[in-house]
Image (tube, rainbow, N blue to C red):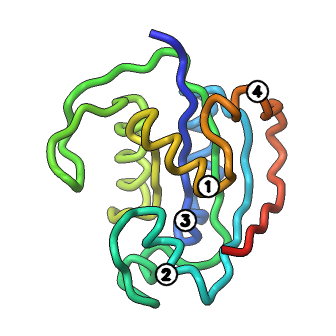
């Protein structure tokens, strides 16, 4: 199977363990880039709704749990994707277990909850990257360097 572009998001309240998580990601994936993203506070709830496809009110439990400050986007290449069935928040699905199992481990490190997001398959990766950056995975392959310096990325949404 060909390699795949995926992403992790460390929401604001996950960043307390960002160094540990980044080190683990570097051991298991090729880290292509890291970007710090800050959504405009007044549109944070709307952006979560667009991102997750669920209607969340301003200052929802999800927003409070994850934090609404700067979050870290990690773009990775999985050189050896492996798909299996896993129980997800929306039922049993076939997912890239390399990403999914890593995400679940990071969430446990943080005491549970959903402070870390990861794409479960290429379709989700394309959706998420297009919303966040305006690029799909094919464009990321063409445009992104292997620079691992965190850049500030602000997009008014």
Q: Which residue is mark 4?
A: 142
Q: Which residue is mark 3?
A: 11
Q: Measure how far apart labels 3 and 1 are at the Cα level.
A: 10 Å
Residue at 70% across, 71% down? 38
- Packing grade of label 4 (10 A; few <14, some 14-19, many >=20) is few
Depth-wise, is mark 3 or mark 1 nearer the camera?
Answer: 3
Q: Which residue is mark 1?
A: 18
- Sequence-wise, which precedes: disc 2 or disc 1? 1
Q: Are marks 3 and 1 in contact (CB under 8 Å)?
A: no
Q: Nearer the viewer, residue 95 or 46?
A: 46
Q: Quadrant of the C terminus?
A: bottom right
- Sequence-wise, which precedes: disc 3 or disc 1? 3
Q: Which residue is mark 2?
A: 45
SS of the residue under disc 1: helix
Q: With 123 as the anchor, is 128 left or right in this view?
A: right
Q: Quadrant of the N terminus?
A: top left
Question: Where is residue 131 shown, x and y percent of the image?
Answer: 58, 56
SS of the residue under disc 4: helix
Q: Measure how far apart labels 1 and 4 are at the Cα level.
A: 27 Å
- Sequence-wise, which precedes: disc 3 or disc 4? 3
SS of the residue under disc 2: helix
| Quadrant in the rendering for residue 145 | top right
Q: Measure how far apart labels 3 and 4 are at the Cα level.
A: 26 Å
């Amino acid at each position: 199977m060909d390699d795949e572009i995926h992403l992790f998001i460390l929401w604001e309240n996950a960043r307390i363990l960002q160094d540990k998580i980044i080190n683990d990601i570097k051991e298991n994936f090729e880290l292509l880039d890291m970007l710090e993203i800050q959504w405009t506070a007044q549109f944070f709830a709307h952006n979560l709704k667009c991102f997750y496809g669920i209607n969340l009110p301003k200052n929802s439990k999800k927003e409070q749990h994850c934090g609404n400050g700067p979050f870290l986007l990690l773009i990775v290449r999985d050189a050896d994707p492996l798909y299996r069935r896993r129980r997800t928040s929306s039922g049993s699905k076939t997912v890239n277990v390399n990403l999914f199992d890593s995400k679940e481990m990071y969430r446990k490190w943080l005491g549970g909850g959903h402070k870390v997001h990861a794409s479960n398959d290429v379709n989700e990766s394309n959706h998420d990257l297009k919303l966040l950056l305006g690029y799909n995975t094919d464009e990321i392959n063409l445009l992104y360097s292997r620079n691992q310096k965190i850049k500030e990325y602000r997009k008014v949404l």
